[in-house]
Image: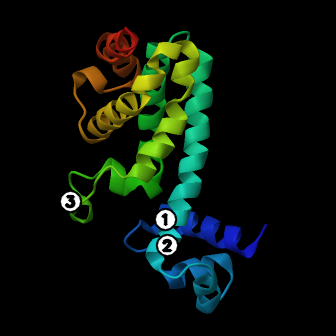
Amino acid sequence: MSARDTIVDATLTCIRQYGLERTSISAVAACAGVSRPTVYAYFPSRDALVSAAMEKSGAAVAGRVVASARRRARTAGEFAVEALVVARREFRKEPAFYPISHARTDPWAVDQKLTEESLALTRSILEPIVDYDPRLEPHLDEITETLVRWLLSLLMYDTKRTSNETRLRAYLKRVVEPVIEGAGC
C-alpha cells in the first residue's frame, strides 16, 4: 500500500474514532505512523485530506449500492428504490458521511450545494437504470438530482413510513417507483 493510501485509510479511521471535527493532521499522522510533513507532502490541507477520504469511502459505498440494487431489481423503478434503501443504510453507518447525513443540524453544512462532482458521482451509480429502460437515458440527470434530493430527505427525517427498511422499501415502491417508471414515457 502506498503512503498516500495509508494516510487516507488513517483519515477514515480517525473520522470513525473521533468524528470529523476532531480529526486533525496530527491525529492522522499518528494513526498512519508518519510525520505531519509527510501528510502535507501528499495533501495541502485538512480539507483536501478529508475530501480524499470521503471520496474513497464514497467509491466503496457506490459499489455496494450498485451491487445490491442490481441483485434485487428487475425494473428501473426497482433499481431506484433499492439504491435509495441501501444508500440510506450506508450513509447512516459511515461516520465520514456525517456532514451529509446530518446537514440540517450541522452548522458547517448551511452553505452546501449539490455540486457537479457529487451529481456526476451519483449519476454513475444510477446509470444502470438505463439498462432496465433505455428511454430514461435523456432524463438521467434529472432522475439523479431528484433521487439525491430524496436521499437527503430520507437521511434527515424519519417517519413511521421510513422507520425501518421494510417500511421504507414499501413507501419508496409506492412513491418513487411510479415516478421513475413514468419518466421514460
Q: Are marks 3 and 1 in contact (CB under 8 Å)?
A: no
Residue 8, visible in the rendered structure: yes
Q: Earlier in the sequence, mark 3 or mark 1?
A: 1
Q: Is residue 34 above or below residue 150?
A: below
Q: Given the image, on which type of amino acid does mark 2 rest?
A: Ala
Q: Mark 1 falls on what kind of element?
A: helix
Q: Given the image, on which type of amino acid does mark 1 rest?
A: Ser
Among the 4 quarters of the image, the one containing residue 80: top left
With 132 as the anchor, is 138 left or right in this view?
A: left
Q: Mark 2 falls on what kind of element?
A: helix
Q: What residue is rendered at 45% in x and 52% in y?
A: 117
Q: Are marks 1 and 2 in contact (CB under 8 Å)?
A: yes
Among the 4 quarters of the image, the one containing residue 52: bottom right
Give the percent coordinates (x, y) of residue 83.
Answer: 48, 28
> To which residue does mark 2 refer?
48
Q: Mark 3 falls on what kind of element?
A: loop
Disc 2: CA contacts within 10 A as few (<14), some (14-19) or many (>=20): few
Which one is nearer the viewer's eye here, 87 or 134? 134
Q: What residue is rendered at 37% in x and 13% in y?
A: 177
Q: Gap between marks 1 and 2, in whole Å? A: 5 Å
Disc 1: CA contacts within 10 A as few (<14), some (14-19) or many (>=20): some
User: Disc number at residue 110?
Assistant: 3
> To which residue does mark 1 refer?
51
